Each structure stands twice: as structure tokens, then as C-alpha cells.
Image (tube, helix red, strand yellow):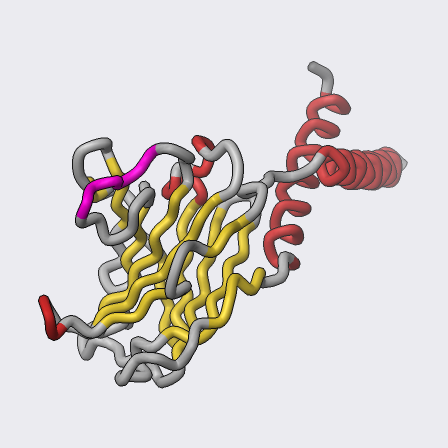
Amino acid sequence: MNRNRTLMLFFFVLGLSVLSTIYADCLPLLHLGTDPDDVKYDRIDMKELYCTTNTTHITFLITCYGEVKTRKKPPTLPRDEFRVYLDVVAGWGDNRRNAPLEGADVIIEAHSQRVYWWNGKRWERKKTLTAQVEVKGNNITVTCQLSDIQFEEASGDIRICFISKLKGSKGLKKVQDRAPDRGWYTLEGGISGLTFLEISAAGLLGLTLASRVRKRCRRVLRDSEG
């Protein structure tokens, strides 16, 4: 492969990378739904739920009715329990009688940053995976890589549900909130990657950059020879 072809290939890849970054930054939040004010403790009472994706990550935004309490020790994580349940693979998931959410196959814990997968018999913690969590005021942001939620196994819609629980509350005294109160939120069509149009645009961007750099290099060489 000659120098010109190598240069053009390099900038094609660079253009794709730049476009992916722009694509990621520009995607709007998808409003999943609004949950009623029906829990005594506002700090775990979820109000608005959002989701956004790009080519590499998925982010969930949980907005509560009150300010979210955080742990005293770093990292800054919710003091109470917040979990995101996902049904990524249709027909596969926790279908036990007492399952916290029937059909779920991925759990993301905001309070521990842990990710769990359903292995067919029980929930298994994936120790190599860590969710990125940020708490600010009434908001909790949870971000994972798409591979962390096994999105490549999805063949259609992805279902989402959120459950929060007051720290230390158990049994009959358990205080928790569920959003939605029944059923699931749905991310219709799953998660799509870069479209053909976007890849083509990345290619054109890369070729344009390669052309400009090649012309500049030639100009520098002529000046140095002169």
C-alpha cells in the first residue's frame, strides 16, 4: 500500500471517529415516562425517567421528587438503592415466581456501580463491568457500555424498569418505588448504530481531510526544495 492510500485510509478512520463523537454528543434524551408522587420519602420517589444512547454507551437519567442523599465516603453514590432493570433478550430472563422483575436479564445498580446478568439460573455479578454514576441534586445519571448490557443479543425492543428502595428497609416495612408502576418502559427498535448515511459522511470527511493534508505536504516539500 503506497503512502497516499495509507494516508487516505487513516483519515477515513479518523473521520469515522470524529463523526461518532459528534453523533454521541448530539443525541437528545428520550423521555421514558413520568412517575407519580406516591412515596413518603422524596429522595427515592422517582419522578422523570430518561434514556439516551450512542454508538458505544447507554445512559439513564433518574430524576426524583427530592434531593438524592449520597454516601459520606467517596465515590459519590446514592445512599439508598437504585436499580435499572433491562429486558434485552426476548424470552430470556428471570422468570422465577418471586423474581423482582419478571423477564429481566440485566440489572445495573446505581448505589454500587455493579452490573448483573441473568445466567439462566441466578443473577451473576460481572466483576469486570462497572457503571459510571453521577449524583447531582435530584438527579442520578447511570452510564454503561453497550456491551455491558449485551445489546448485541437484542433482536427487537428493549424493555426498561427502575426500582428504588430505602436503605435498610426490609420485609413488610420495605419502602420502595417502581417506575413505571406497572409494566415496562420500551426502547422501541432497540439500539441502532451508525447508519449507512453517517458512515458515508464519515468517509467523505476522512477523504477531505486526507486531500487537504496531502496538498499541504506537497506545498511544504516544494518550499523546502526551493
Please tell me how many numbered marks the rendered image carries. 0
User: On the rendered image, what quadrant is the N terminus found in?
Assistant: top right
Residue nearer the viewer, 222 or 50: 50
Q: Is residue 169 above or below residue 88?
A: below
Task: Answer with the quarter of the image where residue 198 lies.
Answer: top right
Please name the residue shown 41% across and 55% down the image: 183
Say if the magenta span includes residue 74: no
User: Can residue 75 be seen in the rendering of this structure?
Assistant: no
Magenta stretch in the rendered image? 92-97
The percent coordinates of residue 82 (x first, y second) are: 29, 65
The percent coordinates of residue 28 (x first, y second) are: 62, 61
Residue lying farthest top? 1
Say if the magenta span includes residue 96: yes
Please name the residue shown 31% across and 53% down the image: 108
The percent coordinates of residue 37 (x first, y second) are: 39, 81
Q: Is residue 132 left or right of residue 223?
A: left
Q: Is residue 206 above or below residue 65?
A: above
Q: Is residue 16 left or right of residue 69?
A: right
User: On the rendered image, what quadrant is the C terminus found in?
Assistant: top right
Main SS, magenta region, reads loop
Q: Is residue 53 above or below residue 153?
A: below
User: Can residue 194 be seen in the rendering of this structure?
Assistant: yes
Please name the residue shown 47% across and 51% down the image: 58
Please name the residue shown 34% across and 77% down the image: 45
